[in-house]
Image (cartoon, rainbow, N blue to C red):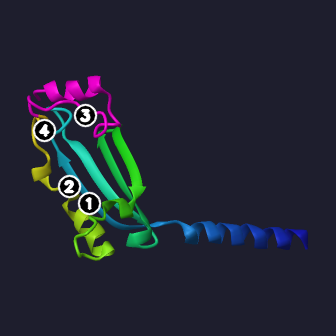
Amino acid sequence: MNKLLFLIIFFTTLGNHVFSQDKILRSKKINIEFSDIDTKDNFEIFLVGESVLKSEFQFVISNGDELLYELSIPSTELIKHNTGVNDEASILKRFDDFLNTNHFIKNPISEDDKYDEDYNYNITEEEWNELKNCKT
């Protein structure tokens, strides 16, 4: 009897884990020259969850086996407010446009730009200046 109870609990727990895992709702990948002039970086984005409005937006940059950057935020952070577009459509549009190659430009920080701590809160001024002065 104890073995039967154990098996029921085990398979119920296993079933709940397997069926509750989030699914990939949408994904996109591009390979472009960005951090290294000799190899291309892999840029990948995903919407993962039970629905577009209840999903996580995941953004990963890697080069070979090296993870360069990773971000996971609620997909609702992609919503452009006050556009008149419904929230799900806004998320999907922003997702689809996110990896457009015209967003990747060389020297994206102009010589006249100044470090703004409020805008660049996730990067130090020293790192920002390294990016600004990067000529590759």
Q: Main secondary structure of the magenta part?
A: loop
Q: CA distance from mark 1 to mark 3?
A: 31 Å
Residue at which label 1 appears: 28
* Mark 4 lies on residue: 108
Q: Could you tell me which residue is drawn at 30 percent across and 41 percent down? A: 62
Question: Looking at the image, which is closer to me, 130 or 37?
Answer: 130
Q: Residues within 10 Å of mark 1 (few under 14, many from 20)?
A: some
Q: Nearer the viewer, mark 2 or mark 1?
A: 2
- Of labels 2 and 1, earlier in sequence is 1
> Magenta segment: does it hold 121?
yes
| Mark 2: amino acid | Leu
Amino acid type, residue under disc 1 in the picture: Lys
Residue visible at 30% across and 44% down?
Answer: 61
Which disc is residue 99 wearing? 2
- Magenta stretch: give its range: 110-136
Judging from the image, what secondary structure is the residue with disc 4 in? Answer: loop
Q: Quadrant of the C terminus?
A: top left
